[in-house]
Image (cartoon, coloured by chain):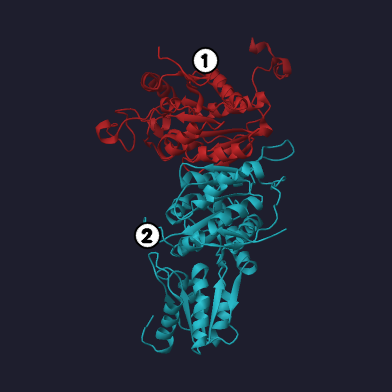
Chain colours: A red, B cyan
């Protein structure tokens, strides 16, 4: 097939099957190969392009691996202090209610140091979207134990595995905020396979569209690997994630249109 | 027709903010400043001007809401009292680092720790020296009346936007709680056009706007630090404000701001009745500090008494300003105790004239 095509045929518009969305900049991402952040960024950028809301979207970047998200998305962005993104997004949305506002946060940022800001933004029902990337570890600072680190999982600050007797239990903050009346849509997704990416993109789109309804907050958790922090190859890390992370953090919708879904 | 109204200092700040065309207030209750949030909630400014008022879950959240609103180029402010201001220091450092304009009101109470709810001036260091991490400064205004509490809201916003820098009204529990006559200015319209750096949505005609304080390249970060320092030097050249009372023939000088300055005015009168030639320098801006007038006056003085309801914080800036040209001492009360005019006059006499107290 492809070997029969000449270069001038390949570059014809009708043969184009994929292109980079212009909402992503040309900056080279600093993420480790195999990390989910790049894919998650791209999904958000694609949805912004498809909804034609580039001029109407303000993003809030966290502290953590994705602190430099503003280098990669061609939209107006603010960079938050560690954990404070939902408070910043609250003000941005309240002052510019017609805009689309989202935060993008990791597990340490959202579920440890920013727990209060997360819970209260959810409980107030701010009409924003929170994209929560959970890889069970502090990636940027070198692989320390996170609030979402699994029991017995090794990290640089739980080198013999997370001992829940000593270190406490992992926090399922997504299930927790789903209980709050202010959340309208709560789901857990992943971006490690093509089918997971397609589902995650639908969730991202729904989170943006929900903002028009003014019914409350949408929180999209994306379970991701941190192959560097987990000391694995990207392929091993995805396999480990499926075997260990996903049974503890099952994928799927938790709350739809303000209604908690019954467990299967 | 404009007329005087009788109002608490805290309420005057809230009313002045609505009239100044503020876009939003984010706060958290703490004594002795809760009237700011209470007044705003009761006044329904969302109906009067469209202003947003929100009670945050913490002082930390409130200052970060201020960051978000300021990042959109809006006129936003918060208020708190000492322990709450300590919690806001992280946010203030980020706001200074991101060069965002905003107004923060500190109605000071005595510390350290939970201290007491009574008035004090012991937050001078954390207000004028930075407070949070990194090399930065706030523009610090010190009102001495309910009228100035109101007037400095508009001034604070103007200076904050002029320099893209957080401004603070550093007042105290006494001024926040006491009622005085105050006359307000006319209602200013809220802004309809926003600074070009604001995150208002990337319109097709411009580059994206980014609000951040991060620069991982040390050489670039130092360049940014130097830019900030140049901004602070410009403030020192252009924004120093102070008041001189009975200083023409003064042999001794009291230096005091806020409530202490009010008391010192009476002390000046009492001392002069005794034939002691005393004047008062009242700093209105604490940063930038009125260094030059102090330096210029020093050779003609026999002594300076810095009066502050603290263990002696502002006295360090007075000492730096006069740089050994004249003897400088501190007198103060702490823990919510307010000095009487007699006490201050007595301290001046004992330290400088009788020599019975070595300061």
Task: Note whether A65 is above or below A49 in the view shown.
Answer: below
Q: Say which of A12 and B174 sits in front.
A: B174
Q: Quote the CA–CA distance across marks 2 and 1.
A: 57 Å
Disc 1 sits on a residue from what chain? A
State the residue position of label 2. Answer: B112
Q: Position of residue B96 (x, y in %)?
A: 55, 53
Task: Note whether B78 is above or below A190 in the view shown.
Answer: below
Q: Secondary structure at mark 2?
A: loop
Picture residue at 54% right of the left edge, 38% below the top: A61
Quarter of the figure that contains the C terminus of chain A: top left
Same subunit, labels 2 and 1: the answer reads no
Q: Quadrant of residue B246?
A: bottom right
The residue positioned farthest toward the left in the image shown: A165
Task: Answer few, some or many: residues within 10 Å of disc 1's Cα (few below 14, many 20 plus, some between 14 and 19).
Answer: few
As drawn, is B95 to the left or to the right of B47? left
Picture residue at 65% right of the left edge, 58% below the top: B184
Q: Secondary structure at mark 1?
A: helix
Residue A31 makes an appearance in the image: no
Q: Say which of B214 and B127 sits in front.
A: B127
Q: Position of residue B247 (x, y in %)?
A: 58, 82
Quarter of the figure that contains the N terminus of chain A: top right
Q: Say which of B107 and A35 sits in front.
A: B107
State the residue position of label 1. Answer: A195
Task: Note whether A167 is above or below B1 in the view shown.
Answer: above
Picture residue at 38% right of the left edge, 60% below the top: B111
Task: Answer few, some or many: residues within 10 Å of disc 2's Cα (few below 14, many 20 plus, some between 14 and 19).
Answer: few
Q: Position of residue B354 (x, y in %)?
A: 40, 89
């Amino acid at each position: 097939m492809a070997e029969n095509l000449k270069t001038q045929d390949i570059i014809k518009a009708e043969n184009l099957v994929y292109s980079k969305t212009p909402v992503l900049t040309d900056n080279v991402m600093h993420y480790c190969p195999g990390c989910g952040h790049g894919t998650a960024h791209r999904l958000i950028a694609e949805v912004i392009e498809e909804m034609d809301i580039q001029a109407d979207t303000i993003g809030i970047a966290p502290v953590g691996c994705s602190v430099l998200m503003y280098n990669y998305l061609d939209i107006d962005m603010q960079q938050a202090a560690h954990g404070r993104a939902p408070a910043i997004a609250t003000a941005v949305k309240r002052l510019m209610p017609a805009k689309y506002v989202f935060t993008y946060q990791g597990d340490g940022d959202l579920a440890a140091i920013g727990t209060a800001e997360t819970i209260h933004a959810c409980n107030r029902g701010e009409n924003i979207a929170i994209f929560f990337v959970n890889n069970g570890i502090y990636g940027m600072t070198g692989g320390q134990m996170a609030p979402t680190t699994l029991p017995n999982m090794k990290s640089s600050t739980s080198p013999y595995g997370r001992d829940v007797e000593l270190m406490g239990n992992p926090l399922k903050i997504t299930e927790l905020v789903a209980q709050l009346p202010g959340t309208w849509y709560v789901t857990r997704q992943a971006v490690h396979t093509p089918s997971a990416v397609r589902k995650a993109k639908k969730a991202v789109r729904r989170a943006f569209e929900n903002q028009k309804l003014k019914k409350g907050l949408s929180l999209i958790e994306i379970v991701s690997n941190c192959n560097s922090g987990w000391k694995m190859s990207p392929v091993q890390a995805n396999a480990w994630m499926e075997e260990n992370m996903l049974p503890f953090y099952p994928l799927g919708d938790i709350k739809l249109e303000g209604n908690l879904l019954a467990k299967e | 027709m404009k007329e005087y109204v009788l109002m608490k200092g805290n309420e005057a700040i809230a009313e002045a903010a609505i009239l100044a065309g503020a876009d939003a207030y984010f706060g958290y209750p703490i004594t002795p400043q809760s009237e700011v949030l209470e007044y705003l909630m009761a006044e329904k400014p969302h109906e009067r001007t469209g202003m947003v008022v929100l009670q945050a879950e913490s002082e930390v959240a409130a200052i970060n809401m201020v960051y978000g609103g300021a990042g959109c180029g809006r006129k936003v402010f918060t208020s708190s009292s000492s322990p709450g201001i300590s919690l806001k220091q992280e946010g203030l450092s980020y706001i200074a680092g991101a060069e965002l304009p905003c107004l923060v009101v500190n109605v000071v109470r005595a510390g350290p720790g939970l201290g007491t709810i009574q008035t004090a001036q012991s937050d001078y260091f954390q207000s004028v020296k930075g407070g949070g991490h990194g090399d930065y400064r706030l523009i610090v205004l010190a009102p001495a009346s309910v009228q100035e509490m109101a007037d400095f809201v508009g001034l604070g916003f103007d200076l904050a936007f002029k320099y893209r820098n957080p401004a603070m009204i550093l007042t105290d529990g006494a001024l926040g709680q006491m009622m005085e006559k105050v006359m307000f200015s006319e209602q200013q319209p809220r802004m309809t056009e926003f600074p070009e750096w604001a995150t208002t949505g990337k319109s097709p005609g411009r580059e994206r706007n980014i609000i951040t304080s991060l620069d991982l390249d040390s050489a670039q970060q130092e360049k940014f630090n130097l830019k900030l320092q140049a901004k602070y030097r410009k403030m020192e050249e252009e924004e120093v404000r102070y008041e001189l009372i009975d200083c023409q023939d003064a042999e001794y000088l009291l230096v005091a701001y806020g409530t202490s300055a009010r008391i010192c005015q009476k002390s000046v009168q009492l001392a002069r009745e005794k034939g002691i030639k005393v004047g008062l320098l009242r700093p209105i801006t604490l940063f930038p500090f009125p260094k030059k007038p102090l330096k210029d006056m020093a050779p003609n003085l026999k002594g300076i008494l810095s009066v502050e309801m603290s263990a002696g914080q502002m006295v360090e800036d007075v000492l730096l300003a006069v740089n050994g040209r004249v003897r400088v001492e501190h007198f103060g009360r702490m823990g919510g105790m307010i000095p009487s005019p007699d006490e201050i006059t007595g301290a001046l006499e004992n330290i400088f004239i009788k020599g019975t107290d070595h300061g």
